[in-house]
Structures are given as C-alpha cells and as structure tokens.
Amino acid sequence: MSFQNKTVIITGASRGIGKAIGLRLAAEGANIVIASKSVEENPKLGGTIFSAAAEMEAAGGKALAVQCDIRFEEQIQNVVDKTVEKFGGIDILINNASAINLTPTEQTEPKRFDLMYDINVRGTFMMSRACIPFLKKGTNAHILNLSPPINMDLKWFENHLAYTISKYDMSMIALGLSAELKKYNVAANALWPRTTIATAAVNNLLGGEMLMNMSRTVDIIADAAYYILSKPSTTCTGNTFIDEDVLAAEGITDLEKYSVVPGAQLYRDLFV
C-alpha cells in the first residue's frame, strides 16, 4: 500500500519513537500531524513539534504541528479539526504518547496514577474516538497503539502494577476497536519492542547510559510500524505485534543494524 498523501496523526511525535515513525512514513510521501505538547525545547528531552515538522518535510512528506495534551478532549478535537482542514481527512492514527512510572503500589502517588491513566488509557481512547469518523472514510485506515502483548505472568504486575494495567488497557483498546471497526474496514493493532529502545525515557527514567547501550534504536519500531501499516486493513487487525516478529515475517532477521552498540548484549523489554 502506498503512503503517498496518506494523512497520519501521531501523538507524542516530537521525539523518540513517535518521531521515528513519522520520519519513516514521511519518506514515503505521507502527511504527518505531530500532536504533542512540546513547543519549547526541554534540554533533557530535545525536540519540539516545530523541529519535528521540519524534519518530516525534509524527509519528503508534508507536516502539520499542533500542540496537544491528550488529557484534554478540546485539544484532541483541535488536532482532528486542523488535520481535516489542512489535509482533508485521516487515514492512520498512531497512539504513541504515554506516561511511565515504575513504582510499587504504596509508592504510586495518586497524581502519578492519574497521569498514566489520563494519557495512556483515557487519552488513547479519546483520540481514537475523535478520529474514527474520519478513519471510516480513510484509505486502508489503521489505528496503531504502542503497547504490549497482554502477558498475565504475575511478574509483570508485582513491581509496577499501575503502569502495567495502564499499558495493558492501551492494548485492550486496540483489540476492542479491531472488533468494533472491522465492519468499516478500519484496522486496529498494538506494537511493542522485544528489547528496550534508546529513547529519552530509557536514558532519563530507567537505566541511563548503561541501558541505552543495551538497547536498539527507534528505527526498528519505525520499520515495524511501516510494515504493519502497509498491510490491508481488512485482514491485518486485532494483533499485539512484537517488532522482531513483524520484521521476521518480511524476511528481515539480521537486526544488528538496529543495535545502539553493535554486538552488545540486548536488554529485554517489559512484558516480553
């Protein structure tokens, strides 16, 4: 399927995985809508919606930067309205924005719990809800949530219950929408990495430089997303994909180029 002139909304696309997917699809001629909060650069994180938009256009696509905090439905609606006004419709939604807080229950403050649920669960649900009327009219329409397979092994619950249930909820949204929207030929899937990915979250929140060096680059997620979104929406729906498996299905099994440090031992991501 061609991405030429397809319109893609990506939440949290000013940096990291969201931006990488945008650049990959922009290189195929897509219109990328960067729906993120960052309008001023944070030195620890880097990137704004405007710098990301400039990179998307340099990569070969068209871009629209819209400031959006997906906790607020009026800001979500503003993204949808501006997207349709500029590009005429919506073909793909990528729910990438997410909050992480890896604390046990007693150490999880209410505000941290609420932040994860407002962004990961409510934000994903409401962004999907706002885009559905246009996705129904889209060409080979897809929703892709950056969330994990629902692995009920209790080891994934015991150390960070709040985060786990919020991410599993994102995957359940994808699975639920795949059933609800099948009759409209709108696909819904989830995608998750086998290994940690070198992003600001990994560097700043999880493991610093040591974990970054045991991670893969964002390009592996971008390539996996590209292959998923290339598939017919009528048949490729209702999956919780792992990046390695997506690439293996395309005959790509040498993944060395994605390692931050070639030959380094890789660190397995949560939930896999």
Image (cartoon, rainbow, N blue to C red):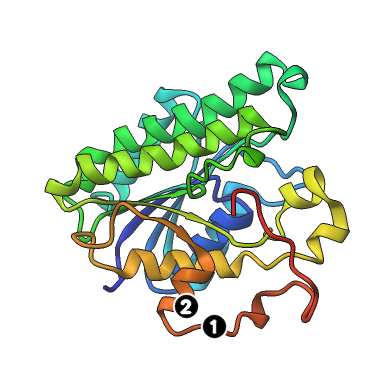
User: Residue 207, position in %: x, y?
Assistant: 83, 50
Which label is found at residue 253?
1
Q: Residue at x 43, y 35 (%)?
A: 124
Q: Nearer the viewer, residue 244 or 94?
A: 244
Where is mark 2, residue-wise?
A: 248
**Residue 184 in picture, x, y percent from top left:** 14, 47
Structural crowding at the residue carrying mark 1, measured as other residues with C-alpha within 10 Å and reported as few (<14), some (14–19) or many (≥20): few
Residue in the picture at 44% in, 70% down: 246
Q: Where residue 14 sits in the image (x, y, percent)?
A: 59, 50
Residue 39 appears in the picture as rendered: no
Looking at the image, residue 114 lies above or below residue 69:
above
Please report contact status of discs 2 and 1: CB closer than 8 Å, yes or no: yes
Disc 2 element: helix
Residue 100 seen from this side: yes
Query: Quadrant of the image for the C terminus?
Result: bottom right
- Please report the residue visible at 64 percent of the width from the left and 29 percent of the height from the top: 161
Q: Residue furthest top?
A: 110
Q: Is residue 74 above or below residue 223?
A: above
Farthest residue, direction left: 183
Q: Amino acid at mark 2?
A: Ala
Which numbered marker is on residue 134? none
Give the secondary structure at mark 1.
Answer: loop
Looking at the rendered structure, the kind of residue marked 1 is Thr
